[in-house]
Image (tube, rainbow, N blue to C red):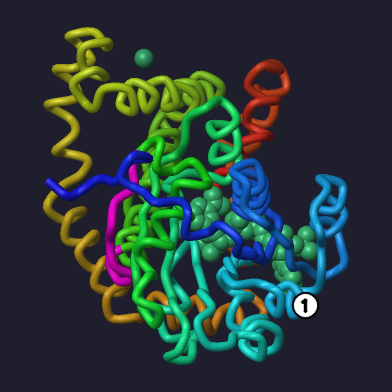
Amino acid sequence: MAKVYYNGDVNEGLLQGKTVAIIGYGSQGHAHALNLRESGVQVVVGLRQGKSWDKAAEDGFDVQTVRDASAQADLIMILLPDEHQPTIYKNEIEPELTEGKALVFAHGFNIHFNQIVPPSNVDVFLVAPKGPGHLVRRTFEEGAGVPGLIAVFQDATGQAKDTALAYAKQIGAARAGVLETTFKEETETDLFGEQAVLCGGTAALVKAGFETLTEAGYQPEVAYFECLHELKLIVDLMYEGGLETMRYSISDTAQWGDFQAGPRIVTDETKKAMKGILSDIQTGKFAKGWILENQANRPEYTAINEAEKNHPIEVVGRELREMMPFVKGKSKGVVGSAKN
Ligand code: NDP
Ligand code: MG
Ligand code: MG
């Protein structure tokens, strides 16, 4: 079994007396900045003028431009949207990235796919919480944490891994467990998980189930509950105790149906498609497409996003959630924070 690091395994002293620049104050940024500060680490936040700047200042942080924050810091954690990182890095971070500093990421995309190429005299590593930023913050406040991954891309000081572990501990991740990985593994598995299962696979499955029922004449409201709303209850059980706990909780009829129908839905063909998706990630084909889509100002992303908003499951869902204020309040919080 892979080695898992917990609080007791980590020397957090490595961040003592150092300044950490948190670049970005969104989902991950606010959580890292607040958790580090409460762990006694000196934090400066780097941003452009705007919403996040005001929020970070309100939270009592020393907020500066990305360039000024990078100049002051020993460790620079980039928590900007992945697609904007290369330009901001080139213009505002690289000029201040002097020997012995650490350049840190929460996702390996830009390093692994060669969009950011740091100088060889700095440490480069990642600390990736395996959960949305708002949970990184909330669990920390509760005395717990979200598990995390660390990986070292470049070790100029000889202390990159220990510094990564210290950082992971100070944001609360080592309370839940920290695993060591590589930039390649983190990047490729993260992309595969969100595409094949968590986001792409699940959204397509939910829509296809809804369409099958409504095309057969069943009420959209009923189809919505069966194919989307109840998914959360099932996933919660899986989260608690794997497939076993989920199957223990459902009826025997549901479990028999699960065994019979599952393999008819996710077939050898589906598995073959998954392998194709993984291969596009490994070869860099997916990354290239996404980088070019951004350079073109996202024409395809925008068109699909608009069409998806009007899918009948979304239309009926909006109406139903209006009548379930408990769901609505909750989902708003999650929508803003559940990015992978
Ligand atoms: P968000 O989109 O939530 O936040 C981005 C932040 O960057 C905002 O504060 C935004 O400020 C700021 N920003 C955007 N453009 C600029 C700019 N040009 N100059 C200065 N600041 C700018 O990002 P996430 O927290 O979702 O993602 C950050 C990183 O964490 C990514 O690498 C992502 O892959 C990784 N990650 C994210 C997870 C998550 O839960 N969301 C989970 C694990 C990893 P403004 O208000 O000015 O726009
Ligand atoms: Mg049912
Ligand atoms: Mg992701």
Residue position marked by numbered label 1 in the rendering: 68
At 14% from the left edge and 38% from the top edge, which residue is drawn?
Answer: 263
Could one spot residue 310 in this view of the protein?
A: no
| Amino acid type indicated by mark 1 | Asp
- Using residue 242 as the reference point, say whether residue 229 is left or right of it: right
Residue 282: % across, % down: 27, 75
Secondary structure, mark 1, is helix
- Using residue 176 as the reference point, say whether residue 23 is left or right of it: right
Question: Ligand 1 near label 1 (Cβ, under 8 Å)?
Answer: no
Residue 251 vertical position relative to residue 190 in the rendered view, above or below: above
Which residues make up the magenta segment?
177-185
At label 1, counting other C-alpha atoms closer than 10 Å, the crowd grade (few under 14, some 14-19, many 20 or more) is some
Q: Which quadrant of the figure has residue 109? A: bottom left
Q: Which quadrant of the figure has residue 47? A: bottom right
At 44% from the left edge and 43% from the top edge, which residue is drawn?
Answer: 173
Could one spot residue 250 in this view of the protein?
A: yes
At 85% from the left edge and 53% from the top edge, which residue is drawn?
Answer: 57
Q: Quadrant of ligand 3?
A: bottom left
Residue 248: % across, % down: 21, 12
- Using residue 163 as the reference point, say whether residue 96 is left or right of it: right
